[in-house]
Amino acid sequence: MSKTNSSPYIGNDNYDPPAARNGDGDKIKEGDADSAMGVATLVDGTATVDSSIVTANSRIFLQQQALGTVTAAKAMAVTARVVGTSFTITSADATDTSVVAWEIVEPK
């Protein structure tokens, strides 16, 4: 798989295919507004994530990483998105302050 541009999607500069790294697992860029994954901390049950790569078709996967004010994991969903700008994660509990990992994948 050649790396030909700076797109954050799998198969491009921000993704190192396993064959190129001697099998040490997938690595995807995180930490910038053009990253394909990262973490967000909920405040009052929501977090808005700045993302210049989010599209109307993006698949955004969420996984709770650490419980905040809740004692058990709560349902979470992407409840809003502004193409090329941001998306919003909302917990079923309005007091939730959990840390949530997210990943954006674009369908072909």
Image (tube, rainbow, N blue to C red):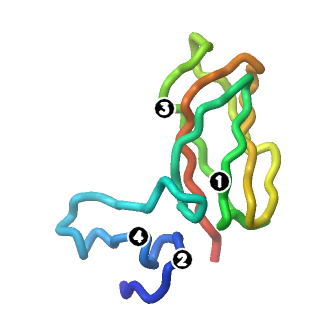
- Please tell me which residue is depicted at 81% across the width and 58% down the height of the picture: 82
Real-space CA distance between mark 4 and mark 3, rounded to the nearest whole angstrom: 22 Å
Three-letter code for the amino acid on which mark 3 is drawn: Gln
User: Is residue 57 among the parts visible in the rendering?
Assistant: no
Q: In whole angstroms, how far apart are the C-alphas of marks 2 and 1?
A: 16 Å
Vertical comparison of 26 with 97: above or below: below
Amino acid type at image mark 4 = Tyr
Describe residue 35's horizontal placement relative to residue 93 as left or right: left
Dividing the picture into quadrants, the one containing residue 24 is: bottom left
Disc 4 target residue: 15
Element under label 1?
strand
Question: Residue 42: image x %, image y %?
Answer: 65, 30
Q: Residues within 10 Å of mark 3 (few under 14, many from 20)?
A: some
Asked which secondary structure carries label 3, the reply is strand
Q: Mark 1 belongs to which amino acid?
A: Ile
Q: Residue furthest left?
A: 22
User: How many angstroms separate mark 2 from mark 4 (CA)?
Assistant: 9 Å
Q: In terms of sequence position, does the residue under pointer 3 or pointer 1 come before the other? A: 1
Q: Earlier in the sequence, mark 2 or mark 3?
A: 2
The first of marks 4 and 3 along the sequence is: 4
Along the line of sight, the residue nearer the viewer: 64 or 35 = 35
Three-letter code, disc 2: Ser
The secondary structure type at the circle numbered 4 is: strand
- Tell me what residue is drawn at x 77 percent, y 20 percent: 94
Q: Tell me the distance, in whole angstroms, between the alpha carbons under discs 1 and 4.
A: 17 Å
Residue ID for mark 2: 7
Q: Is residue 77 above or below residue 95?
A: below
The 10 Å Cα crowd at callout 4, few under 14, some 14 to 19, many 20 or more, is some
- Closer to the camera in the image, 84 or 67: 84
Q: Is residue 64 visible?
A: yes
